[in-house]
Image (spheres, rainbow, N blue to C red):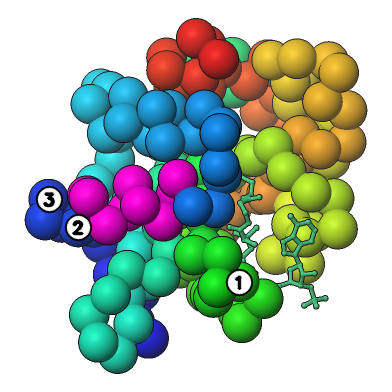
């Protein structure tokens, strides 16, 4: 398996994986809108490709803001159901973090399981002074200080525009 940037021909397979991982959910439509959004960052839309060239998983990270400071929001992330719990999601997460560091970004935030994301270094965002778009998310709204993190940057997090329509 390799992790690489998505290319335009990957899109149908990416949507198939996302629809299978999130049946009857909004994620595929959200992803469609993120691909078209001005907050889309091509360096941070990554696929996991299997030995036969098939797409096994995808993760996207888009531009967001902490107050007026540019930041990053990760998600959705999806792995094909029959290939979950084999380390693919972890490989996509680590590649996203590495790519964000290489871009000189400072902070990565996400909404997700408190059992899963702390293993990559994520902590409750409010412990870093970053408040969530929805207070009901509680400790599920998490943040990771990247290599270029500037301590003291705090405030309300704003996701890429398509998230606001959810
Ligand atoms: C979440 C997801 C991306 C993780 O990818 P993966 O390839 O299955 O994960 P990995 O194999 O790297 O890691 C597996 C570990 O994560 C844990 N894990 C996976 N999904 C989890 C979840 N939703 N909640 C809690 N723990 C989870 C497993 O228990 C396992 O833990 P262990 O290593 O202690 O046994 C994948 O399971 C998936 O697509 N799920 C459906 C869509 C989803 O919920 N996406 C996340 C919200 S945006």
- Would residue 116 be found to the left or right of residue 17 on screen? right
User: In the displayed structure, would residue 101 be above or below residue 72?
Assistant: below
The answer to whether the residue labelled 3 contacts the one labelled 1, judged by CB atoms less than 8 Å apart, is no
**Comes first in the chain, label 1 or label 2:** 2
Instruction: Identify the residue at the far top of this view.
Output: 165
State the separation of the CA atoms marked 3 and 1: 24 Å
Q: Main secondary structure of the magenta part?
A: helix
From where the camera sits, is residue 103 visible? no
Magenta residues, start to end: 11-19
For disc 1, does the CB lie below 8 Å from ligand 1?
A: yes
Task: Say what secondary structure mark 1 lies in.
Answer: loop
For residue 94, the mark is: none
Q: How many marks?
A: 3
Identified at 85% across, 50% down, the residue is 114
What whole-number distance in Å separates the C-alpha atoms at marks 1 and 2? 19 Å
Using the image, tell me which numbered label, if any, was put on residue 84: 1
Q: Which mark is residue 8?
A: 3
Query: Mark 2 touching mark 3, by CB under 8 A?
Result: yes
Q: Are marks 1 and 2 in contact (CB under 8 Å)?
A: no
Residue 139 percent location from the top left of the image: 88, 36
Q: Residue 110's quadrant in the figure?
A: top right
Label 2 neighbour load within 10 Å: few <14, some 14-19, many 20+: some
At numbered mark 3, what does the secondary structure look like: helix, strand or loop?
Answer: helix
Q: Which residue is mark 2?
A: 10
């Amino acid at each position: 398996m390799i992790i690489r940037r998505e290319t335009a021909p990957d899109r149908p397979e990416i949507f198939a994986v996302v629809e299978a991982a999130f049946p009857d959910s909004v994620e595929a439509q959200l992803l469609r809108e993120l691909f078209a959004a001005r907050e889309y960052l091509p360096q941070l839309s990554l696929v996991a490709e299997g030995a036969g060239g098939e797409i096994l998983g995808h993760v996207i990270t888009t531009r967001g803001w902490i107050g007026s400071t540019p930041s990053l929001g990760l998600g959705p992330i999806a792995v094909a159901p029959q290939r979950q719990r084999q380390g693919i999601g972890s490989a996509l997460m680590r590649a996203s973090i590495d790519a964000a560091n290489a871009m000189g970004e400072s902070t990565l935030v996400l909404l997700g399981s408190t059992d899963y994301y702390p293993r990559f270094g994520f902590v409750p965002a409010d412990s870093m002074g970053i408040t969530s778009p929805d207070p009901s998310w509680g400790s599920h709204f998490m943040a990771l200080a990247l290599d270029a993190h500037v301590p003291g940057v705090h405030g309300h997090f704003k996701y890429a525009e398509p998230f606001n329509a959810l």
